Each structure stands twice: as structure tokens, then as C-alpha cells.
Image (cartoon, helix red, strand yellow):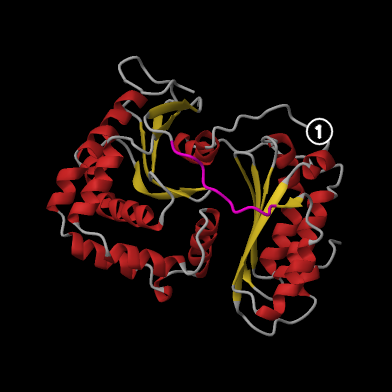
Amino acid sequence: MPAPNPFLDTALTNSDEAAFYLRWELPSPQPALWRMLNAELKPLTEDARQAGVTLTFSAYGPYWQLQLNGLREPMVAVIEHALHRLQHPEPASLAGDEPELIPIRQLLKQLADHYLRSEPQLTVGDLPSVWAASRWISFASGFSAASQPLIDATLNAAPGVRQTDSPKPPATFPGKRWATEASSSSEDAVLVFCPALTASIEDGAAWRLLAHVSQALFYQRLRVELQLGYAVFSGIRQINGRTGLLFGVQSPSCDAGQLFQHIETFIGRLPERVRDADVSEQIKALSAQFEPSSMPDQQQADMQWQAHLAGHQGSHSQALQRALSNLDTHSLLTATEQLTNATGGWLIVANRPANAAIPLSLPEL
């Protein structure tokens, strides 16, 4: 018989929710070790789910991240078990073959790796050595003051060394660069990630407003009018504290170069779209989305975590609302100019190499 779920031993006394993030920075990516540890956590993930806690262990660039969302009461115990298993995996913990993803999902999965320019270095098979060379930071939301000593005590068992300096978002580089994530699919897919020039709250607000203005227009142009494919989307994406606009398309009929040119053309026409927009109404509608009553708990926690990685303190949703209230058509056009000029850089990730007809200001990766 399977062992009893340790997180269901006692009845819950409240249904308050919380979130917890613990991120390690490694000397270099270690994909094989991550797959092994992720497999090790599968039984714990299921036990936590039954107790009302969602546990994920992700890898991006040189980082491993443990994230918990859900009911607060069993969360500290789940963290304790997770930290033990991450340091003492069973020898038989082998990752199974991952299912093949459709091209656009595979690109989304690898986007952060390409943005952080992290290629796997010499893979280290010695897990204790990897942990010893790692640094970690943590962030908790929704816990009571009485819970903090429990969290601190639990973190004493975390492998690696606590990071004492403030986290910094990745640097931006002007220009356009193309990265290829090869795929055997017959369909082509492209992502274009356009980070804001700085990690300031003001730039973040402007980029979110640009995303709000362009989202329906992008879908209308590429999906409805051009009928490029069924997977057409745009929106905000945050990577390691850096906010960016993300455009994505998968098509059975257009090649990657053509898809990129359609996205590039759309971005190039954004200034006229901004001039035609009722910016004050767009600001009002977007600002309402950041009201606590309008945001699920996990979305609020994720936003605070990304703000923490960008070096911001306090309520990020309120700060964004204040920054949005200071925007107007002129300031939004300034942001649009930075976007169209690739001042903060464009990262194009596709499942095919760039062709010679596409001018890139930075070499292909």
C-alpha cells in the first residue's frame, strides 16, 4: 500500500492562501540533474495537490525555482519535504521521456533559456557540488507574522548560500537577434520577445499598456485577416524580473521568415494604432485589472515575485496603477518608438534558422 499522505494528518483550521518562491542560481545550467530532481518530486507534488498546494519545480537559464501556491496551513511542511528530497533523491529517480510539444509550446518552454543566453556547460553529475556552488533567494506572500519564524527555520535547511545582494534583472541589448530551437514538425513557429528598456515601474506600466492596446489588434490582423494559423497571441511576459512584450504565431502555411516579417510589420505600425486609440479609456480598463478583487491570488503573488526580482518593494499592483495614471498618448508614443527601434532588444525564437533575407543587427545564436 502507498504511504499515507503526511499533509492530511490534521484537519485544516482555515482556508487562507499563500505563495512561496525559492530560487537557486547555479554556476551553469544542469538540465540532466534538473530532470532527475523533477522526477524525484513527482510523488510529493501529488501529495501536496491533495492537501491543496500546487508545487512546481522549474529550470530556466542558470536557475532552479521551487514554487508553492495554495492553502497556507500545510505549506511549510511541504517545503520541508521538498528541500529534503532535493538534497537526498532516491537513486532510482529517473526522468521519463517528455512528450513532444507542438512547436509554439516548445518555443515558449525554451524562451527564458534563450533570453538569458544560458547554454548548458559541463554537466556536473555530483549533486552536492552543484548545491554547494549555488546561491538562493526566497519570497513569501500571504503568511502571517507568526509563520515567519517557521519559514526561516525551514530555509536553514536549504542547500546553497543565501544571496545577500539585491537581485538584478537581466541586462538589455539593443538590436534584433535570432535563436533557433529545432523542431521536426512540418509547421513553422516564431516568438518575438521585446523587453522594456529598463526594469523601472514606469517602463513596466508603459509596456503593459502597449500590450493591452495591441492584443486584440494583433489577433485580428494575423489570425482573422491574414489567416496565418490557429496559434496567434500576444501579451506580457516577465523573465527574471524583466517585463517584455511577447508575440507568437504558429502556421501550417507560412515559413518562419515570413511569420517574423508579419510580426515586424505589425509592430512597425503600432505608432498609428496608439494615435488612434482612446488612451485614457485604455488606461482605465487596464488599471481596473490590477484591483486586488480582480486578480487571483496566484497572479498577485507571481507579480510580486517578479517585482522582487526587479528590485521593487511594496505593493506592485498599486505602483503600476500610479504609473499608469501618469501615462498619456505622448509618453506611450515614446515607449512605442523604443519598441519599434528595438532599443531594449528583440529576441526572435523560431523552430527554423533565419534566412538571408532577414536583416539582423546581432548574429544568429
Q: Quadrant of residue 119?
A: top right
167 magenta-colored: yes
Q: Is residue 126 visible?
A: yes
Give the residue drawn at x 78%, y 32%: 124
Q: Is residue 95 visible?
A: no
Secondary element under disc 1, as helix, strand or loop, is loop
Q: Residue furthest bottom?
A: 13
Give the residue drawn at x 52%, y 33%: 114
Judged left or right of residue 354, residue 168 is right
Location of residue 129 in the rendering, given as x and y in whole percent from the top left corner: 82, 39
Location of residue 150 in the rendering, given as x and y in whole percent from the top left corner: 76, 72
Q: How many numbered badges does the structure rendering display?
A: 1
Location of residue 282 in the rendering, given as x and y in whole percent from the top left corner: 23, 62
Q: Residues within 10 Å of mark 1 (few under 14, many from 20)?
A: few
Q: Residue furthest left?
A: 276
Judged left or right of residue 152, residue 364 is left
Task: Using the image as rendered, state which of residue 27 and residue 60 is in the foreground.
Answer: 27
Against 205, residue 365 (above or below) is: above
Dominant SS in magenta = loop
Give the residue drawn at x 68%, y 35%: 28
Identity of the amino acid at label 1?
Answer: Gly
58 magenta-colored: no
Give the residue drawn at x 81%, y 33%: 125
Q: Which residues are magenta?
A: 163-172
Task: Using the image as rendered, state which of residue 330 and residue 88 is in the foreground.
Answer: 330
Against 83, residue 354 (above or below) is: above
Judged left or right of residue 226, residue 21 is right
Q: Residue furthest top?
A: 356
Residue under label 1, please give it. Answer: 125
State which quarter of the image contains the N terminus: bottom right
